[in-house]
Image (spheres, rainbow, N blue to C red):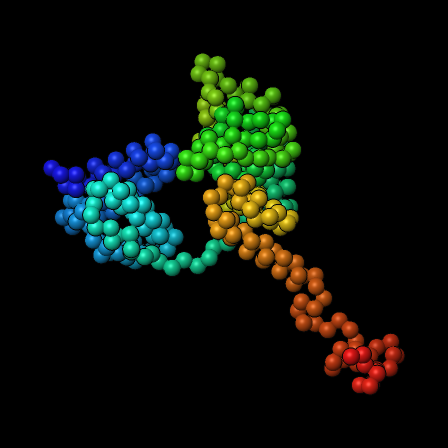
């Protein structure tokens, strides 16, 4: 049996191993890629296709079309297209497939989606909601402060170990960034205070002496806190704070970037702080910032709505018994 004739799932597993070992993809990414490319493989097998070399662009177009007709959101359809394209690039580079036209398939057109974020007042309300003194409350406050104060991703927060934190320099060593990249992330005084309090008074009470974990944030068993648990923590405190939004860890990342831009930070600085490879990825926050400025202009500028503010404007009568100027008296 030649390489191209291997079962579809054989090469999918090979690809997942490549993502895990060489690209250092997160378990979340591996699970999504495995499931969603696996769905495409099952679609192909139902049509008698057992080799990736026999896949034609029309097969991918048909599968994506079926998903769209079933009501899948355009963004989700586009994500599956991206995953299959990336998979075929892997197969092509290793000489497993000869036909690379699958990479030419286009996805649904997506409108620009501006990131959802919290206002500064909502952020303060969220932090005030986490004001307890128990080990869990101290942990949760540190989590919230760090997500907003550093802008790191959820997966990056989960992967943090105690040794990755430098409180004096207010730096985090991100070992498992997107695409396996390592970087240094910064955080402010509020996050430093919350972290120091948690490390001194909270975390020691959560450590499992029989099975010590290097993880920064621990669950009740003394092991690394999961993505699901942190997402629930953020959501629950947002509800306690009375925030009527579906607040997620990623929304705090968006809030971090948006508030920096609104404060006048240079886009290149925000790019570095977020760990974006390209400034185009960060560009979306300039649109949010511009919308914020427009809202302020519309609310406070006296001429924003086209309402005359002086009695001597065209079409209005003078007030306070002041005579109107004649055309010869008006200033040029």
Q: Is residue 196 at least partly visible in the picture?
A: yes
Question: In the rendered view of the protein, which quadrant contains the N terminus?
Answer: top left
Quadrant of the snapshot with the C terminus: bottom right
> Which residue extends farthest top?
210
Give the image location of residue 168, x and y in percent.
63, 26
Q: Quadrant of residue 178?
A: top left
Q: Residue 155 in the image: x percent, y percent?
A: 45, 35
Q: Position of residue 77 (x, y in %)?
A: 34, 52
Residue lying at the far right of the rendered structure: 321
Give percent across and percent down for residue 308: 73, 73
Horizontal side of 127 relative to 155 (left or right) equals right
Q: Is residue 120 above or below residue 104?
A: above
The image shows residue 318, relative to residue 280, as above or below, that is below
Q: Is residue 201 above or below residue 232?
A: above
Q: Residue at x 79, y 76 (%)?
A: 311
Q: Answer left or right for 96 relative to 200.
A: left
Image quadrant in which you'd find residue 38: top left
Pick the front one: 266 or 134: 266
Residue at image x 32%, y 50%? 81
**Residue at x 49% of width, y 38% of height:** 153
The residue at 70%/68% (across/down) is 303
Q: In the image as oriented, which residue stretches furthest toward the left?
A: 1
Asked if residue 248 can be seen in this view, the reply is: no
Q: How many marks?
A: 0
């Amino acid at each position: 049996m030649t390489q191209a004739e291997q079962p579809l799932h054989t090469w999918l597993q090979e690809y997942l191993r490549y993502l895990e070992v060489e690209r250092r993809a997160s378990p979340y990414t591996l699970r999504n890629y495995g499931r969603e490319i696996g769905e495409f493989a099952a679609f192909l097998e139902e049509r008698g296709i057992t080799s990736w070399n026999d896949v034609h662009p029309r097969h991918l177009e048909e599968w994506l079309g079926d998903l769209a007709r079933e009501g899948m959101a355009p963004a989700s359809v586009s994500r599956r297209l991206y995953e299959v394209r990336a998979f075929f690039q892997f197969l092509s580079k290793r000489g497993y497939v000869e036909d690379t036209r699958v990479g030419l398939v286009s996805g649904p057109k997506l409108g620009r989606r501006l990131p959802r974020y919290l206002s500064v007042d909502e952020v303060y309300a969220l932090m005030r909601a986490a004001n307890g003194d128990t080990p869990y409350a101290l942990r949760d406050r540190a989590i919230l402060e760090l997500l907003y104060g550093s802008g790191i991703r959820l997966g990056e927060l989960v992967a943090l170990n105690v040794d990755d934190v430098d409180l004096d320099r207010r730096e985090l060593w991100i070992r498992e960034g997107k695409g396996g990249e390592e970087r240094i992330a910064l955080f402010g005084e509020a996050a430093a205070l919350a972290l120091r309090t948690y490390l001194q008074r909270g975390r020691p009470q959560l450590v499992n002496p029989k099975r010590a974990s290097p993880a920064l944030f621990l669950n009740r068993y003394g092991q690394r806190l999961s993505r699901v648990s942190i997402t629930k923590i953020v959501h629950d405190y947002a509800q306690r704070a009375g925030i009527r939004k579906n607040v997620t860890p990623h929304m705090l990342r968006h809030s971090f970037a948006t508030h920096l831009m609104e404060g006048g930070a240079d886009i290149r600085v925000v790019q570095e702080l977020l760990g974006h490879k390209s400034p185009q990825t960060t560009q979306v926050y300039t649109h949010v910032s511009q919308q914020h400025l427009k809202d302020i202009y519309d609310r406070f500028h006296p001429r924003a709505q086209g309402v005359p503010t002086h009695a001597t404007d065209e079409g209005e009568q003078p007030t306070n018994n002041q005579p109107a100027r004649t055309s010869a008296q008006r200033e040029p």
